[in-house]
Image (cartoon, rainbow, N blue to C red):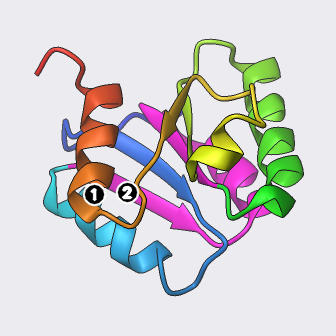
């Protein structure tokens, strides 16, 4: 797997919502992260195999998105158990899932989103 050349922490962002994905990507980039993103889970898995990521961030929209997100999480964890995975979701979804290492509950707050990711990727910063 390819490592980031820039020395920045790399995040794979999988988000099926076309309007939110570029906004979150920009927030993460402004926070100093290198971000690769996609709108679908299949492409996310392909991208994961291509390089090292410090965090795989999977957006889970509503209860209907849990199954696909957990499938992607399981595929990655089976292959690389040490990979850190976080779901971005609301409180209700967070209590219905157990696959990811972390949950980022943003409640539509960009600052909370950025801080939640920093807390996971840079816990001692």
Q: Mark 2 points at which residue?
A: 35
Q: How many marks?
A: 2
Q: Residue at x 77, y 48 (%)?
A: 69
Q: Residue at x 27, y 29 (%)?
A: 119
Q: Residue at x 15, y 62 (%)?
A: 30
Q: What stretch is highlighted in magenta?
A: 33-59
Q: Which numbered tag is attached to residue 42?
A: none
Residue 78 location (% of width, % of height): 82, 20
* Mark 2 Cα shell of 10 Å, populated few (<14), some (14-19), many (≥20): some
Q: Can residue 34 be seen in this view?
A: yes
* Most foreground residue, 35 or 114: 114
Screen quadrant of the N terminus: top right
Q: Name the residue under label 1.
A: 28
Q: Is residue 70 above or below residue 78?
A: below
Q: Which of marks 2 and 1 is nearer the N terminus?
A: 1
Whether residue 37 is in magenta: the answer is yes
Residue 54 location (% of width, % of height): 41, 31
* Most foreground residue, 35 or 7: 35
Mark 2–mark 1 Cα distance, whole angstroms, equals 7 Å
Q: Residue at x 60, y 65 (%)?
A: 15
Most distant residue in the front direction: 92
Using residue 62 as the reference point, say whether residue 103 is left or right of it.
Answer: left
């Amino acid at each position: 797997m390819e490592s980031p050349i820039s020395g920045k922490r790399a995040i794979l962002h999988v988000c099926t919502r076309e309007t939110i994905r570029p906004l979150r990507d920009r927030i993460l980039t402004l926070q100093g992260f290198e971000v690769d993103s996609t709108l679908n889970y299949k492409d996310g898995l392909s991208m994961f195999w291509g390089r090292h990521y410090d965090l795989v961030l999977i957006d889970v929209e509503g209860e209907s998105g849990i199954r696909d997100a957990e499938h992607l999480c399981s595929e990655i964890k089976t292959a690389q158990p040490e990979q850190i995975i976080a779901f971005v979701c609301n409180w209700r979804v967070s209590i219905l899932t157990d696959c990811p290492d972390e949950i980022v509950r943003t409640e539509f707050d960009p600052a909370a989103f950025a801080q939640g990711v920093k807390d996971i990727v840079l816990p001692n910063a």
